[in-house]
Amino acid sequence: MAELEATIPESVMAQIRAREAEVIGKPPRVAPLDRQSVAAEVQTTTTMLRGGVVGAMAPLPLEAIPEIMFVMQRYPALWQQLINLTLQIQGPDAVLPVRDRKLTILRTGWLCQAPYEFGEHVNQAKRAGFTSDEIERITVGSQAPGWTDHERALLRAAEECVATAMVSDETWATLAQMLSDHQLVELLVVIGQFVATSYFQNSLRLRLEPANRGLSAR
């Protein structure tokens, strides 16, 4: 962790520490359910979610399942609807390319300063082939050097939606050169879902999992 933080400018690390103190520096607002009391339900939901997003996987041991699953299981109907949307826009039926989706999710998570969301999706992006340099440039955004015009427009779409709740004509036109209408609509839903996810993860003060480095993840 210290080696990772050493690559991030101290001014940025100071901002990260302040934000993480605000979001996760206090106890969670909603306690997770006892793991044994909902073991079957959470095992089923976790296996469905992981399998739908990354393909068939062996079930996780109960103790290895992320705590968020035991918090949100308090509200199973609402949680199931959120999972259904996740499977639609990140599973095999998703129409947006994986790289496009990850760029957008990470930029949204960074803009929302969402430690849990950003750190988890850095881990996923690294497994999908993203480099630490690319993730650092995502934190800088669409103005960072090295992006293609399409990648820059994806990042700008997230920036514009978070700032003004609308994608500009210029950004839309650039994206439309490579994305279909269906993909463009899915892109907007992805941004919206991860803004909403940052709202509840931040506000519930969900604790980071051991492998989640939060906003300092690279």
Image: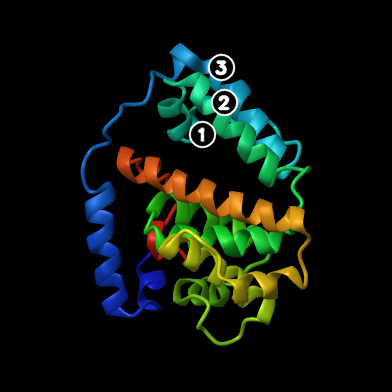
Amino acid type of the residue tagged 1 in the rendering: Ala
Residue 64's disc number: 1
Question: In percent of the image, x 68 and y 73: which residue is there?
Answer: 173
Amino acid type of the residue tagged 2 in the rendering: Gln
| Along the line of sight, the residue nearer the viewer: 130 or 168 | 168
Question: In percent of the image, x 64 and y 56: which residue is there?
Answer: 187
Residue 164 on image: x %, y % = 43, 63
Q: Quadrant of residue 127?
A: bottom right
Q: Which residue is mark 3?
A: 41
The furthest residue to the top: 37
Residue 46 on image: x %, y % = 59, 29
Q: On screen, 63 above or below 153? A: above
Q: On screen, 166 above or below 70? A: below
Q: Quadrant of residue 19?
A: bottom left
Of pointers 3 and 2, the one earlier in the residue sequence: 3
| Along the line of sight, the residue nearer the viewer: 189 or 51 | 189
The furthest residue to the bottom: 145
Q: For the residues marked 2 and 1, what is the alpha-carbon distance in whole angstroms?
A: 20 Å
Please say whether residue 180 is visible from this viewpoint.
Answer: yes
Residue 96 on image: x %, y % = 73, 56
Q: Which residue is mark 2?
A: 80
Q: Secondary structure at mark 1?
A: helix
**Image marks 2 and 1: residues in contact by CB distance under 8 Å:** no
